[in-house]
Amino acid sequence: MHAEIIAIGDELTSGQRLDTNSRWLSQQLGDLGIQTARHTTIGDSLSDNVEALQRAVARAEVVVCTGGLGPTLDDLTRQAMADAFQLPLELDQESLDKIVAMFASRNREMPENNRVQAMFPRGSQIVPNPHGSAPGIDLQVAAPQQARTGESPGNVNRSCRVFALPGVPAEMRQMWLETVAPRLELLLGSQLGRLHYHAVKVFGIGESDVEVKLPQLIARQRTPTVGITVSRATITLRVAGRATDAATFQHQIAPTLGEIESALGDLVFGAGDDELEHVVARNLKQQGRTLACVEVGAASWISDWLLKVDEPQCRCFAGGVAFPNRSAAERWLEREPAAESKTITSGCGEMENASETLEDERWTAIARLAAERFGAELALVVGVYPSVKEMECTNGTFDFVFALATSTTVHLERRAMGGHPDVLGPRVAKTGLDIVRRYLANEGLTRNGLANNGQ
């Protein structure tokens, strides 16, 4: 069974408001085992509304509209339904009485133009609105007598259930949960299981590379389906299928998850809503360790992320410090006599021409100092984040240093990375967190192991 969602209103097509209703409704339909095939957004035009309804009914078994049920001249949904399906609008006295009573409860007299909200296409059922003046519409209509693409000619005598709900999210959601969803459950009976989803999180590989490694899993028309999306360098593999309950679904997708794990190995870092910071914080807690962080440059992503996920009773994040540039980090280092005597052999002004070995010594010293100052078992140093202006002016890559101080040594690595300004910063920060994740998972790391995670 397929559904389509139609969001109605000039405020949506003009970009003045964001359509959050369609996203929520798609999730709710999926929970019922109904796949949403299309989202349509249209303005307050009667002809456009009529056309959208007729097209949707020809393709789907369920159509849900939001918006256009108000009392003003630009609220056209009920008239569009009447015109699209050639049905007269009729007054429902019970609905009118409820609207009048609602205004009376607020010490107001109902304006005459609100009377239109009690008008319904003939044959409709009412969808009560407990907190607003606009009841919803529930109408079953005959679908056009033609087969859809891929549909056998013997299946053309079908109907479509059309629901129209207010655009106000709070009203729409309550009406859906209390009335529409139960009606659809009765319609479905036990013919379909619900749609279930399982997200696999991956970092350290590009989207196209994942597809190369999993060509059969990403293929269309597969059961269960595996979709792939990327957000700020994190890959999400979304496994979807129908099942009567969560346990059955997990049993169904176990072979698929096994194939993903086998192909991607430790590039997989989590599942569900996990992000790298959640996994790192969880592993730190399990091992009874703490982590400090130093970020150098025009960002401090890691500290911000860890502060948001660290549990008060855990205190896995010992603390962090951000420096605007490398010189500021070196001045922090130079204020520590012990650290200076061990690692610094030239002043800050000479650093631009210093050898790579000397630079490594400075980054190593900063990592050790961070562990000492914050009293942490581990300390991560990441630098140098370029500014947005630098990223916009440079089409190539930037060199980054990652240093992880442990109780016995400092693991240091350099990587060259580039990318869109909105992605590069988070990608660098996630690379740092991924180094910590791998260390905690493997109880140590090597340069060779990290190199295999390069992008």
Image (tube, rainbow, N blue to C red):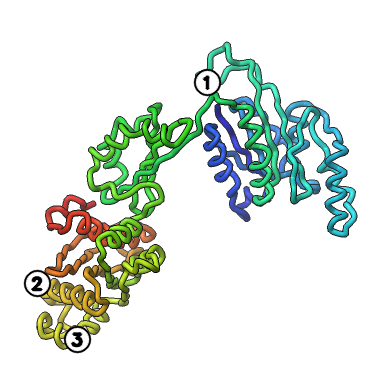
Q: Nearer the viewer, mark 2 or mark 3?
A: 3
- The percent position of residue 321, horizontal first and vertical second, equals 31, 76
| Crowd band around label 2 with a 10 angstrom C-alpha radius: few (<14), some (14–19), many (20+) | few
Say what amino acid the circle numbered 1 marks. Answer: Thr
Q: Position of residue 40 (x, y in %)?
A: 59, 39
- x 26%, y 51%: residue: 204
Q: Image height check: is 113 above or below 420?
A: above
Instruction: Please report whichever mark, 2 or 1, sits nearer to the chain's N-terminal start.
Output: 1
In the rendered structure, are the residues bearing label 1 and label 3 in contact, judged by CB atoms less than 8 Å apart?
Answer: no
Seen at 88% across and 38% down, the residue is: 93
Residue 357: mark in rendering:
2
Residue 292 shows up from this direction: yes
For label 1, the SS is loop
Q: Is residue 396 visible?
A: no
Tell me the crowding category of disc 3: few under 14, some 14 to 19, or many 20 or more residues within 10 angstroms, Cα based. Answer: few
Residue 336: assigned label: 3
In the rendered view, tell whether residue 239 sits above or below residue 330: above
Question: Which quadrant would residue 220 be assigned to in this image?
Answer: top left
Residue 289 in picture, x, y percent from top left: 25, 66
Q: Work out whether 324 lies above or below 250.
A: below
User: x, y percentage for residue 358?
Assistant: 11, 75
Is label 2 in contact with label 3 (beta carbons under 8 Å)? no
Say which quadrant the N terminus sits in: top right
Which image quadrant for residue 403?
bottom left
Q: Which residue is mark 1?
A: 149
